[in-house]
Amino acid sequence: MKVKAWGVGGSIPAPSSEQENYDRSVRLLERFVLDIRKTAMFATTVERGKKEDLETFIQTYLQTLSPAFVSGYPRDTTCIEIQAKDTPLIILDAGSGIRRLSQDLTKRTKLNPLNTKPEYDNQIQLFISHTHWDHIQGFPFFAQAFNPNLKIHFYAMQNPTKKLETVLAGQQQSPYFPVEWQHLPCEKEFTELTPYNRKTIDVGNVKVSWIPTDHPGGALGYRFETKGKAVAIATDHEHRDIEHPGLVNLAKDADVFFYDSQYLPVEYKGGNKNTPAGPVPRLGWGHSTYEWAIKQAEASLEAGTKQEMTLVLVHHEPARNDFQLEQLLEQAIGYAALNNVGTDKQMKIELARPEQTYTFEE
Ligand SMILES: [Zn+2]
Ligand SMILES: [Zn+2]
């Protein structure tokens, strides 16, 4: 199984500003100048004057720096791809990240390179956490929807008043978008999920299960599992005073757990003008903190039999710049160490990054 993130930002696509890109260049050059003073290697490389040597030197040097200095963290909204052996391509959410996935799919000979069954080659199974705009806004730019030979099967939580198709078609209604939903030539199928109907669906070799999370209007967390390997994804969830029992189960024995870490604990309670999310308390906004990401992941890790889990902090606050994101990760790792998380069992904590891939042997 292969899990690849294409969009990991929260709430709205948030490209870096010109000032942020400029600041990154300044920090990178400062750091470079400080670092080369410590090494004679650069001077020797430059004196020799060979372009290839210089390129290798620079590439090797850049690898020693974190993404905030080098590339930043592209901030498209949620889209995660799941490939499994002999299974249709699975996608979680159609945030703006799905546009990049779409570009990649057009270059592939098969939608899911791990599939060998011809009947799955022309279908996509799209699971939607919820239909807030940041989780569906990329769909109108999903080029594969214009292929009449492709079937897209949509899954999302049942809405009490509107059919799933009506909700998805809404964002393409005139005058919001030039191509209306009914003019998309792909074949479409819909399954509305409730917490009370079937709790699992088999898609090829993947068992999909879901639970409702705490989010305004409701949302689903999903688990995708095949041959003992599992990924759990809860992009939009607001923690309460205790670990969410459904989520503990959802991520039990998961190898990778994506969990909503939009806020710093101080921002959640009400930060100040120096905290990126600002001074307004975020209680009831439907998102969580890195502290609760760790508590929730720890509870799942303890409940299961596996010895390790990778916790991926996701749904990044759009106001947080790349360096502030890495500070959040540092604080999270510090919090985990202070609370002896990962002493009995190992928990690796990472920031979600587009194009980050997790591969599991089946
Ligand atoms: Zn969201
Ligand atoms: Zn939402």
Image (spheres, rainbow, N blue to C red):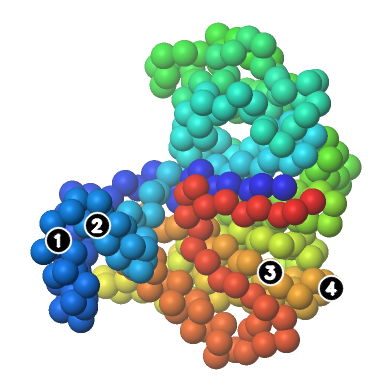
User: CA gap, disc 1 to disc 3?
Assistant: 47 Å
Is residue 31 in sight in this rendering? no
**Dot 1 amino acid type:** Arg
User: CA gap, disc 4 to disc 1?
Assistant: 56 Å
Q: Earlier in the sequence, mark 2 or mark 3?
A: 2
Q: Earlier in the sequence, mark 2 or mark 1?
A: 1
Q: Element type at marker 4?
A: loop
Expressed as whole percent of the image width and height from the top left, the position of residue 319 reads 33, 58
Quarter of the view holding residue 37: bottom left
Q: Which mark is residue 309?
A: 3
Q: Which mark is residue 79?
A: none
| Residue at 47% in and 25% down | 141
User: CA gap, disc 2 to disc 3?
Assistant: 39 Å
Looking at the image, residue 218 sits to the left or right of residue 107; the answer is right
Ligand 1 within 8 Å of disc 4? The answer is no
**Dot 4 amino acid type:** Thr
Q: Which mark is residue 48?
A: 1
User: CA gap, disc 4 to disc 2?
Assistant: 49 Å
Q: Is residue 319 above or below residue 4?
A: below
**Dot 2 amino acid type:** Asp
Read off the residue under disc 4.
305
Q: Element type at marker 3?
A: strand
| Residue at 30% in and 57% down | 56
Read off the residue under disc 2.
53
Q: Residues within 10 Å of mark 1 (few under 14, many from 20)?
A: few
Q: Earlier in the sequence, mark 1 or mark 3?
A: 1
